Each structure stands twice: as structure tokens, then as C-alpha cells.
């Protein structure tokens, strides 16, 4: 399943790249893209565990840049 | 500027007001002071004021396991500066770092805004008509077959067919075409356009998710996921850059005093400059921003580019292959010549042909009807059209006003032993005869798009080496079109499968990239096989648009040279940014190593370079059509 999320206060391009790298390492994520320009995140992950994976995604992003919010 | 940015600006100004008197005092009254405790305390005031959030973030990120974080490195660099007695420099580094960050933030937000404004085509609501009552609903909730009403000035929410009303529609958001299009009953209407002055009632033909506007938004939003090689390179490079610079700084701090025999503080001073330069931000930010600007510029001209990698490929394109029908030509048949024999008027010939073909729904017959209506508007066709007989593969036999009329090809004329003439020009010929007497012929052909010749000429001008045309049409027709447009090569009478083979052949022969431009259903495999597939958006099939990498929304082939120009400019900007940012950084690193650059230069190499690179990227957005 592929889903898109809006992001608020994603302030630095390097952070976006770091988030993307961190999300891709999460188990069950097939593909991820954090677009600094569009302030959006696209996640492709296993259907049945999607909600749980999203929790991990949020945690991973918080680690990189706690100010950034993901609108679920 | 938003609230957060305004607050930052206030902090910067306040710090500057406190800092500058201290800076002057430091160089005059306190120049010989060696009371380090006093100086540290005094300069800590502006330092904390401007840098508390950086220190806070650094601490938080270390807790989260992010060691080589720019905040942390800035802290180390400024602490180091305090340690070796460069109090004013420490505050200055923090101050200018914040100024640069603020500026970066504002510039990025601005450019992002202006890019998304270009793509601001999403409709917010639809007026649905139910039992004569209008109701405002989300476009998502409208079903196929529903009737919606579009008032003057509203954005068209869904694709459909006009059932009543008449208006001019502004399609510029989708196609870049500024002349409004006239829409009346029976016309198809596409979502994302803006209704002019009239009221339109439209029957919805597609759900919102399948509508033109949703598909375009989807394409543009996904554009950033297909990254150019340069972009990927920079992201990877950034990952190694910071640790390497930091390690160099540590080595410098340790080795320098050992080798030169100078004081330890000099080594630390130089290492601190390194740390200030260690953030790869200028690169990481300006490369995608340049590409984003390029894609934005293209979409403002009605060209959708599905990823920055395609801009990169377009820059390297040397061969371009066109499909003929629908790409270079209009794809619809028109009467291009009416040639009566002497004694017969053009009007009479066209009238007889139109009457004979009146009940046929063949595309050729339709084009004759259109020509009649267009050239002699208001004229009536004869009432008595009887005994219409369609002879398959030959033409039509009919009785008009009691006279036997033949309208058809050479075979039909031969069958009745009617001598004909050799037609001048290329296309499908319809001969006409009345009671066995030859009257003349009509020439029907697919007309070349008005912009096609210009498109080819412009591509040559900007240095595309080879232009090729592929067509399933007859050899003479293909060659005539190729001559007219000035194409280098033409391959005619190809089956859909042959087109793939031809493109593969060209791909093999060419060292550079090959683009294919097409529109039809059977082009999809060719579009995906070529390095760059370019599809016609408004006329093309969904499959072709899906398979294509670049979509021309208004079917105008002359837009191709424009995108190539945009691609080249974007790539040039991106390369300038990389060379400039890396060049300045490396130069300052070298100068700092030998002691010729201090923290001031380092701050410039970090934030100054970022800001300049961002401003440079913005140029990609501003590409004007000549």
C-alpha cells in the first residue's frame, strides 16, 4: 500500500534526506520518499502492518527533527 | 514571513544591537585586557540570546544518537572559539549562521510557494444538481452520470460533457495556452480549467480520482520521487562529507601544534573553522530546488515532467523520434483540395459529394460534410437523396435529384469505365461522376499541425542532431510530410511492433539519449522503451500518458524545444551550484588549514554559499518563452 502524508515544519533539506534514509531502514517499508520541496512524505509498506509501521516512521522522524510534524 | 520567522528576525536584530557596541569596545577599550573571565561573561550575553536554541537542539539530537549534526558542530566550533579567546568571532559565527538559516528558510518557502501556485489547479467543491436543487459537495462524492452546474468564474471540478450552456473556458492552468476555448453543448470539458462568463450544466463522465486534474496532481506530486543522478549523488555525498570534514578538523587540531611547534590554541582555532564549513546544506538544498524549479517552469507552460531524471536525460538527448499521426499532424482528415473539371463549380462538386456521403459515417465522409458546412455555411443540401448504395472498398452510388452520382476511388470509376485525371497532391482521393460524366475530385488528407514545422526547426537550432519520423501510413504520405517539416529520416508503413524495433535500432546506434514522441494507444510500448517518452496529453490515450515520462498538455510539439531549453538551463544551474558550493568550501578549508582564513570566511562558505546557491536555483523557475 502506498500512502501520502503532509508534513509541517520540515525546515531543512538535509533532515529530509536523513528521515528518508531512516524510514527506509524500518522493517516492512518497501519504499519511502520525503520531499522537502513538496513538504510531503510517501510511504510504501506492507498492508497488514501499515498502522504499526507508521508509528515507527513517526518515531524515526522525531529522532531526526523533533519539530517536524506528520499529519496522519 | 510567518510568525516563527518574524520572531527569529527580532532575535537577530536584538542580538546585533547588543553585539556591535561590544565588538567596538573589544577593539578599543578592552583591546589589551587579559581578563578572560570578564570578556567571556560579557560576550556570553549575546551568544546565549542568539544561540540558545542551537545548543538546545544539539543536546537533544545527541540524546537521539545524531552526532554529526550541524547544531552540535556549530556549538563545538563556537565553544572552541571562546576557549581560544576569540569571543567576538564566536558570537559572530552564531549570529550569521542564524541570519543565513532565516534567509534560507524564507527563500525556500517563497520558491516552494511560487512553484505550488503554478500547480494550483485542484477544485474545492462541485455544485451537484439533484431534483432541481443545487448542493455544494466535495468533488470526491460526485458519481459518474451526475449533473453538475458550473457557474461563471468557477473551477471545473470533474471531467464531463456539456449538456447545456455555452461559455469560454480558461485552460491556461493545464495547457499554458492563454486564449480561452469556446465550449458549447455536446463538447467535452476537462477538470482544472476555469469557467469564463457562462453557466454550464455538465454531465460527469469520470470520477474525481480518474479525472484529468487528479491525474495531473498525482503526476506532479510523484515527480520528486524520481531523482536525477546528480541529485542521488549529492545525497550520498552529503552523508560522507560531514564526518570527513569533522575528522579532518580533529586531525588538524592535534597534528598542527605537534608539527609546527606553535601553541595548541592555534590548531584549535583552525579546526573550528573546519567545523563551521562541515554542513552540506548548500548542496543538499540547492540541487533538488533547481530541479523542482525546472519542473515547475515546465508545468507553467503546460508540460508535465514526471521526474528530475527526465530533465537530466533531455539535456543529453540527441535523437528525437516522432510518430506522425496525432503528433506532427492533426490526426483528423480534412478536405484539402476541391478540383472540379472546367464547367463545374467548386460549390457544386462539394455539394454533390456532401449529399452523396450524407448517410455515411466513415471519417472521410465526415470530413466532406465538415468542409461543405465550413465553406458554404447556410446552404442546403438537395432534398432528394435516394437509393444510396455503399460499395465496400469502392465508394458510394446514389441518386440525387434523379441523377445517378458516383463518389469513390479509382476502382469505382474504372468499374464504370469513367476516365479520371491524376490528382495533384498527397492524400485520399474521392472522384465524382454524374450520369457517367467525370466531374472532378476531392483530396482529403491529414493536415500537418501549424506548429510542427517550427517545432522541428527549433529542435535543430538547439542542437538536436537527428529528427526521425515513424508512421504506419503509406510511403508517399510519410515522405511528403517529412519533406514539408524538414525531418532527417522517415520510416513508413510500419506496424506497431515495427515501431518498437525501429526505436531499439536507434537506441543502439546512438550514444546519446533517444526520445520518442507519440500519442496513440499503440504507442505505449514505444514510449516506455525509449529513453524519454513524450506523450500528447489532451488527445492521447490514458495508456500513452501513463507510459510517458513527459506529457504535453496542449499537444503542441513546439513545446518540446522549450522543455529541452528548460532542462538545459536547470542542469546548468544545478552544476553551477555544485561547483560553486564545493569550490568555495574546499578553498576555504585549504586556506583555513594554512591559517589564511578565519571564522568569518568559514561562515561565508557555509551560509553565504547556501544563500547564493538558493537564489541561483530560483532562476530555473523563471524561464520565459520567446
Image (tube, rainbow, N blue to C red):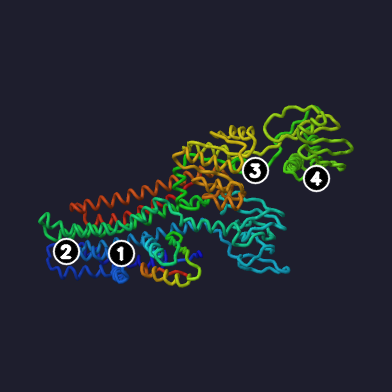
Work out whether residue B2 or residue B115 is closer to the camera in this orientation and state it.
Answer: B115
Sequence-wise first label, 3 or 4: 3
**Residue at the disc numbered 4:** B359
Q: Secondary structure at mark 1?
A: loop
Mark 3 lies on residue: B331
| Mark 4 and mark 2: Cα distance apart in space | 98 Å
Query: What residue does disc 2 label?
Result: B85
Q: Residues within 10 Å of mark 3 (few under 14, many from 20)?
A: some
CA gap, disc 2 and disc 1? 25 Å
- C-alpha distance separating marks 1 and 4: 77 Å
Image coords of residue B449 (percent x, y): 61, 40
Mark 2, Cα crowd under 10 Å, few <14 / some 14-19 / many 20+, is some
Of marks 1 and 4, which one's residue comes earlier in the chain? 1
The reply to the same-chain question for discs 1 and 4 is yes
Residue assigned mark 1: B69
Residue B144 circle label: none
Ranked by sequence position, the earlier of labels 1 and 3 is 1
Share a chain, discs 1 and 3?
A: yes
Q: Do the residues marked 3 and 4 share a common chain?
A: yes
Label 1 and label 3: CA atoms lie apart by 58 Å
Q: Quadrant of residue B495?
A: top right
Q: Chain of mark 1?
A: B
- SS of the residue at dot 2? loop
Pick the front one: B538 or B514: B514
User: Given this view, does label 4 or label 2 mark the residue nearer the observer?
Assistant: 4
Q: Disc 3 vs disc 2: which is toward the camera?
A: 3
Q: Are marks 3 and 2 in contact (CB under 8 Å)?
A: no
Amino acid at each position: 500500500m502506498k500512502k501520502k502524508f503532509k508534513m509541517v515544519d520540515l525546515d531543512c533539506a538535509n533532515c529530509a534526506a536523513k528521515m528518508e534514509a531512516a524510514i527506509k531502514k524500518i522493517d516492512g517499508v518497501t519504499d519511502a520518499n520525503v520531499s522537502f520541496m513538496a513538504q510531503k512524505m510517501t510511504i510504501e509498506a506492507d498492508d497488514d502492518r501499515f498502522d504499526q509501521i507508521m508509528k515507527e516512521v513517526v518515531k524515526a522522524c522525531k529522532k531526526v527533527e523533533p519539530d517536524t510534524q506528520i499529519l496522519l | 514571513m510567518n510568525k516563527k520567522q518574524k520572531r527569529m528576525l527580532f532575535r537577530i536584530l536584538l542580538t546585533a544591537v547588543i553585539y556591535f557596541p561590544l565588538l567596538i569596545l573589544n577593539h578599543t577599550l578592552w583591546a589589551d585586557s587579559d581578563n578572560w573571565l570578564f570578556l567571556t561573561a560579557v560576550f556570553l550575553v549575546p551568544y546565549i540570546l542568539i544561540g540558545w536554541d542551537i545548543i538546545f537542539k544539539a543536546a537533544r539530537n545527541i540524546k537521539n544518537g545524531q552526532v554529526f549534526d550541524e547544531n552540535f558542530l556549530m556549538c563545538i566550533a563556537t565553544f572552541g572559539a571562546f576557549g581560544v579567546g576569540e569571543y567576538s568571532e564566536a558570537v559572530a559565527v552564531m549570529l550569521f549562521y542564524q541570519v543565513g538559516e532565516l534567509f534560507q528558510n524564507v527563500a525556500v518557502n517563497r520558491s516552494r510557494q511560487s512553484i505550488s501556485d503554478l500547480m494550483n489547479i485542484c477544485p474545492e467543491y462541485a455544485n451537484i444538481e439533484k431534483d432541481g436543487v443545487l448542493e455544494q459537495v466535495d468533488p470526491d462524492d460526485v458519481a459518474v452520470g451526475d449533473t453538475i452546474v458550473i457557474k461563471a468564474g468557477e473551477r471545473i471540478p470533474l471531467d464531463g460533457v456539456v449538456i447545456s450552456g455555452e461559455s469560454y473556458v480558461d485552460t491556461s492552468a493545464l495547457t499554458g495556452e492563454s486564449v480561452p476555448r469556446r465550449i458549447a453543448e455536446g463538447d467535452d470539458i476537462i477538470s482544472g480549467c476555469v469557467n469564463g462568463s457562462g453557466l454550464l450544466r455538465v454531465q460527469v463522465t469520470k470520477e474525481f480520482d480518474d479525472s484529468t486534474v487528479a491525474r495531473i496532481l498525482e503526476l506532479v506530486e510523484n515527480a520528486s520521487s524520481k531523482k536525477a543522478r546528480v541529485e542521488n549523488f549529492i545525497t550520498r555525498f552529503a552523508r560522507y562529507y560531514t564526518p570527513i570534514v569533522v575528522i579532518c578538523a580533529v586531525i588538524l587540531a592535534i597534528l598542527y601544534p605537534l608539527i609546527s611547534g606553535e601553541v595548541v590554541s592555534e590548531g584549535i582555532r583552525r579546526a573550528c573553522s573546519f567545523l563551521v564549513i562541515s554542513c552540506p546544506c548548500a548542496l543538499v538544498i540547492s540541487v533538488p530546488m533547481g530541479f523542482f524549479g525546472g519542473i515547475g517552469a515546465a508545468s507553467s507552460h503546460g508540460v508535465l515532467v514526471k521526474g528530475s531524471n527526465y530533465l537530466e536525460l533531455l539535456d543529453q538527448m540527441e535523437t528525437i523520434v516522432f510518430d506522425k499521426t496525432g503528433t506532427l499532424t492533426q490526426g483528423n482528415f480534412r478536405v484539402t483540395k476541391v478540383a472540379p473539371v472546367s464547367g463545374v463549380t467548386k460549390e457544386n462538386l462539394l455539394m454533390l459529394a456532401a449529399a452523396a456521403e450524407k448517410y455515411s459515417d466513415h471519417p472521410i465522409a465526415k470530413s466532406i460534410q465538415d468542409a461543405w458546412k465550413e465553406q458554404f455555411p447556410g446552404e442546403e443540401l438537395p432534398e432528394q437523396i435516394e437509393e444510396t448504395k455503399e460499395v465496400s472498398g469502392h465508394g458510394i452510388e446514389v441518386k440525387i435529384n434523379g441523377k445517378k452520382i458516383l463518389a469513390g476511388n479509382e476502382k469505382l470509376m474504372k468499374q464504370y469505365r469513367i476516365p479520371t485525371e491524376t490528382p495533384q497532391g498527397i492524400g485520399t482521393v474521392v472522384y465524382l461522376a454524374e450520369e457517367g460524366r467525370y466531374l472532378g475530385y476531392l483530396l482529403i488528407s491529414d493536415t500537418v499541425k501549424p506548429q510542427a514545422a517550427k517545432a522541428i526547426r527549433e529542435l535543430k537550432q538547439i542542437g538536436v542532431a537527428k529528427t526521425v519520423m515513424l508512421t504506419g501510413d503509406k510511403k508517399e504520405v510519410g515522405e511528403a510530410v517529412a519533406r514539408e517539416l524538414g525531418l532527417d529520416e522517415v520510416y513508413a508503413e510500419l506496424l506497431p511492433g515495427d515501431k518498437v524495433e525501429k526505436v531499439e535500432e536507434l537506441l543502439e546506434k546512438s550514444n546519446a539519449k533517444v526520445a520518442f514522441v507519440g500519442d496513440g494507444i499503440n504507442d505505449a510500448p514505444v514510449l516506455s522503451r525509449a529513453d524519454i517518452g513524450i506523450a500528447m496529453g489532451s488527445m492521447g490515450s490514458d495508456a500513452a500518458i501513463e507510459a510517458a515520462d513527459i506529457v504535453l498538455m496542449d499537444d503542441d510539439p513546439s513545446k518540446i524545444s522549450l522543455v529541452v531549453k528548460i532542462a538545459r538551463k536547470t542542469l546548468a544551474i544545478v552544476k553551477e551550484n555544485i561547483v560553486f558550493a564545493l569550490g568555495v568550501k574546499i578553498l576555504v578549508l585549504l586556506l583555513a588549514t594554512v591559517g589564511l582564513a578565519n571564522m568569518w570566511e568559514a561562515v561565508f562558505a557555509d551560509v553565504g554559499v547556501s544563500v547564493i546557491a538558493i537564489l541561483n536555483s530560483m532562476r530555473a523557475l523563471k524561464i520565459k518563452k520567446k
